[in-house]
Image (spheres, helix red, strand yellow):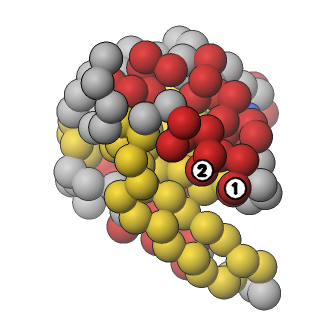
Amino acid sequence: MRLSKRLKEICDMVPSCDTLIDIGTDHAKVPISVVTSKKANKGMACDIEKGPLERAKANVKKEGLSGMIECLLSDGLSCVDVSCDDVIVITGMGGENIRDIIDASLQKAKSAQVLVLGPQRHPEKLLSFLLEKGFEIDEERELIEREKNYILIRTHFGGLE
Ligand SMILES: C[S@@+](CC[C@H](N)C(=O)[O-])C[C@H]1O[C@@H](n2cnc3c(N)ncnc32)[C@H](O)[C@@H]1O
């Protein structure tokens, strides 16, 4: 499966994990790549819209990964269980939307090993929210693809409960 420069960077920022949970998965290229490379034992490809979810299912089936990647209709993390061995990826949407998805399921986000986030707009609003809630920023990467700037953030909850 061909990955754009941005999607390659996202996959590169994902550490070894049990389940890779991709929220707003659309094409499911991230869980497909991470599971295929054996960085994750399994994947969850989640989207709020049926159309993108069908696209995800078709790609997962084409790659022969239907037994390893579950495709789930879910608003953010609402239908997902998260453990400390799991990684959450939320990329390709606005920083405010990513912030609201995390805020709506804050305990789940806090319990993940790591979150990899790719705000397309307003990264500053997402970053200030994360710091306010006790998340630590492990890494920020900037890249340019087709003359568009992207920022990617790897973070984990570092505060005390
Ligand atoms: C532009 S695509 C990004 C696809 C992929 N993550 C990427 O980075 O290339 C954004 C996707 O997020 C989904 N989405 C938006 N809000 C969501 C939410 N609250 N929960 C789950 N999915 C959501 C949309 O339906 C859409 O398929």
Where is 98 relative to 39, above or below?
above
Question: Residue 79: image x %, image y %?
Answer: 53, 12
Question: Residue 104: image x %, image y %?
Answer: 62, 17
Q: Residues within 10 Å of mark 2 (few under 14, many from 20)?
A: some
Q: Give the residue at x 21% y 51%.
A: 16
Q: Is mark 1 within 8 Å of ligand 1?
A: no
Along the viewing direction, whichever of 64 and 48 lies nearer the viewer: 48
Question: Residue 17: image x %, image y %?
Answer: 22, 43
Where is 80 relative to 70, above or below?
above
Mark 2 = which residue? 127
Q: Give the residue at x 57% y 13%.
A: 78
Q: Residues within 10 Å of mark 1 (few under 14, many from 20)?
A: few
Along the viewing direction, whichever of 150 and 69 lies nearer the viewer: 150
Along the viewing direction, whichever of 104 and 63 lies nearer the viewer: 104
Q: Is residue 93 left or right of residue 73?
A: right
Is residue 24 in sight in this rendering?
no
Mark 2 and mark 1: span between their CA atoms? 5 Å
Q: Give the residue at x 60% y 56%.
A: 118
Element at label 1: helix
Q: Is residue 99 left or right of residue 110?
A: right
Q: Do the residues labelled 2 and 1 touch (CB within 8 Å)?
A: yes
Along the viewing direction, whichever of 116 and 49 lies nearer the viewer: 116
Locate ligand 1 by image quadrant: top right
Element at label 2: helix
Q: Is residue 136 left or right of residue 49?
A: left
What amino acid type should be assigned to the residue bearing mark 2? Leu
Is residue 4 in sight in this rendering?
yes
Mark 1 = which residue? 124
Number of disc labels: 2
Q: Give the residue at x 35% y 58%.
A: 138
